[in-house]
Image (spheres, rainbow, N blue to C red):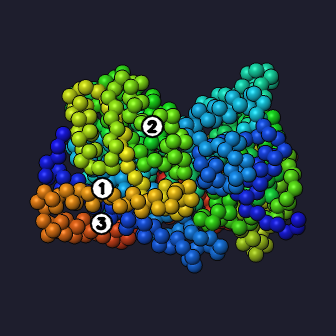
Amino acid sequence: MADRELTMAAAISEAIAQEMENDDNVFVMGEDVAKYGGIFGATGGLLDKFGTDRVMDTPISETAFIGAATGAAAEGMRPIVELMFVDFFGVCMDQIYNHMAKNTYMSGGNVKLPVVLTTAIGGGYNDAAQHSQCLYGLFAHVPGLKIVVPSNAYDAKGLMIESIRDDNPVMYFFHKGIMGLPWMAYFTGSTNEVPEESYSIPFGQAKVVREGTDVTIVTLSQMVHKSTAAADALAEDGISAEIIDLRTLVPLDRETVLNSVRKTGRLCVADEDYLSFGLSGEIAALVAENLDSTNLNGSVKRLAVPDVPIPYSRPLEQTVIPQVAHIESTVREMMN
Amino acid sequence: MEPTKEQLLWMYEQMLVIRDFEETMVNVYLEGKLPPEIQEGLAFDIGSGLVPGEMHLAAGQEPVAVGSCVHLTDDDTITGTHRPHHFAIAKGISLNSLAAEMFGKVTGLGRGKGGHMHLFSVDKKFGCSGIIGAGMPQACGAALAAKKQGKDWVTVTFFGEGAANQGSFHESLNLAAIWNLPVIFICEDNKYAISVTREESTAIANNADRAIGYGIPGVRVENNDAVEVYDVVGEAVARGRQGKGPSLIEVSTDRYLGHFQGDAEAYRPENEVSTLRENDPIDRLQQQLLDSGMTEEEDSQIKERTKASVQEAYAFARESAYPDTSEATQHVFV
Ligand SMILES: Cc1ncc(C[n+]2csc(CCOP(=O)(O)OP(=O)(O)O)c2C)c(N)n1
Ligand SMILES: [Mg+2]
């Protein structure tokens, strides 16, 4: 059906529902995923369709139920398990990074773990230091986890279906500020046309969401929409920005990034994760390792949270999380 | 253990302050969060208004806070939860700095950096966390410090019945037991962890029974009643001060409002809250006090006083300044 728009939350739950219809091994568990439909709506409507056997509310026992997802996956099930906010990983990280991420390798490739760990990320609505982080860089740092970070409903559906079908552990990060929730302001560009039929989007393919010639903005998730707004403003002054939405961090589409930088000669990374030792450094390193072919026309710029916890107070939060104006002014500086 | 008249009055007044603080927040929180001031198409915007972000209020849960804190001094420590206002108020944290923190103002407890789930007072020895189950290990540490320093100070750690399924609960109980630490573990059983009921999440009916597994006393307070809490927590605090080790207490209590403000509560039976409110713990204590000699005039004086203090706190918060943005990068380290 043409012109059917979905919010990202609806696209995610539709993708899960379609895979649950296809494959009895797929099931969902997590805190408030059933009756509530997920605090951020990612599992909305699933309980009514599939019942409590396949859509399971859990106790607040993340180590147990995320570990259980790994255990069930090893037995051939395809669990989708939600960690309500990524910030809560601390109570269950061992199950994630020492087991979900490593059992395949440690078994010499014999143990398959088709599990999808979904989680909410991001700030911008003043939920403070323990409920506003992104942290995908931290998980991408650990070998053994595929990392998916969609920016819009169309990608969210295709990437979710790909995630469920993958025989490896996938962490799927949805930013709260693009889910299209009726109770949180969001970037409306994230709600877009989504085909009803099932489709998948392969991992490791970044998307050029806007073509440009002067500067490459490498970004992801909600920051794609901020970058687009900045690029609109820059275009008025004749500055042409190319925007790359990474979509997945593991695997990372290095070629698309490098090709763009080869074309524009300038790189700005716009990220909502912490600045140091993370995604923005990784992208900068990628270009640094390929300087001979990129003909960089000035220093790489990185926009990210300046290594402080996310403060509660609105003016402070707005200062540390890169905003449209920050992206715009940074690119202007790069052009001078 | 029986409360004195003064203690009863103190608990009554503190409950009134807490209730008023929370119910005032219900309205203040909505300022600027409703159409037409927000993004078109939204019913509500959590990130807008004077007090943005999540807001977990404790109206209905006053007895557990006041019946516990009445036994504590400024030397005793509390670790609280994501729903922390009632504990903070009963521990004596100034309403002004509490309210200002929620407005993100520089006059707040944490200069606006923490927000409502992350309240810290060194003077009142109070801390809390937005991570479920996070207070209990730190409570063990505070109690360990008191013990090493030869003090008779106790630490009270509050947590919800949902948190009793978190590993930190079990690890902390065992640690406190083997080290004989003066920690009082107090579980607020408000029957819900967001939408998940305790029956759905918990294998046994009484979390206090879990004390058996750690060889420590466990008591459940069946009613949402300040005097009953007073009695049970009083014994546990005395044990702690006497070096007799930890206790586990579960208090049955009632959450009058949504899990957070804006929660549609579709998971909750209709009329549940109105029925609960008919048996309100503040009304009951008021009646008890009136029966035992408090005059109507004394009662209205208390109410005027509490109202004034809450109004002053919100006015203070509104009028206070935001922190300068240069503060954003300060205080990562001292
Ligand atoms: C480790 C962790 N997991 C999940 C959450 C999300 N969460 C916040 S409050 C809550 C329910 C807590 O229930 P309970 O402990 O009973 O406290 P109550 O809200 O009823 O006061 C949940 C699941 C969290 N904050 N931290
Ligand atoms: Mg509860």
Q: Mark 2 falls on what kind of element? A: loop
The span from disc 2 to disc 1 (Cα, nearest Å) is 23 Å
Q: In front: A264, or B212?
A: B212
State whether residue A125 is above or below residue B234. Answer: below
Q: How many marks?
A: 3
- Residue type, label 1: Pro
> Earlier along the polypeptide chain: callout 2 or callout 1?
2
- Residue type, label 3: Val
Q: Mark 1 falls on what kind of element? A: helix
Disc 2: CA contacts within 10 A as few (<14), some (14-19) or many (>=20): few
Where is residue A104 shown, x and y percent of the image? 75, 26
Identify the residue shown where x is 42% and y is 30%: B210
Residue B213 — which label? none
Does residue A84 appear left or right of residue B317 in this picture? Answer: right
Chain holding disc 2:
B
State whether residue B26 is above or below residue B165. Answer: below
Q: Is mark 2 within 8 Å of ligand 2?
A: no
What residue did someone put label 3 on?
Answer: B310
In which quadrant will I find the C terminus of chain B?
top left
Does residue A62 appear left or right of residue B325 in this picture? Answer: right
Does residue B311 appear left or right of residue A243 in this picture? Answer: left
What residue did someone put label 2 on?
Answer: B205
Residue B281 — which label? 1
Disc 1: CA contacts within 10 A as few (<14), some (14-19) or many (>=20): many
> Earlier along the polypeptide chain: callout 1 or callout 3?
1
The span from disc 1 to disc 3 (Cα, nearest Å) is 20 Å
Q: Are marks 3 and 2 on the same chain?
A: yes
Q: Is residue B284 visible?
A: yes
Identify the residue shown where x is 42% and y is 36%: B206
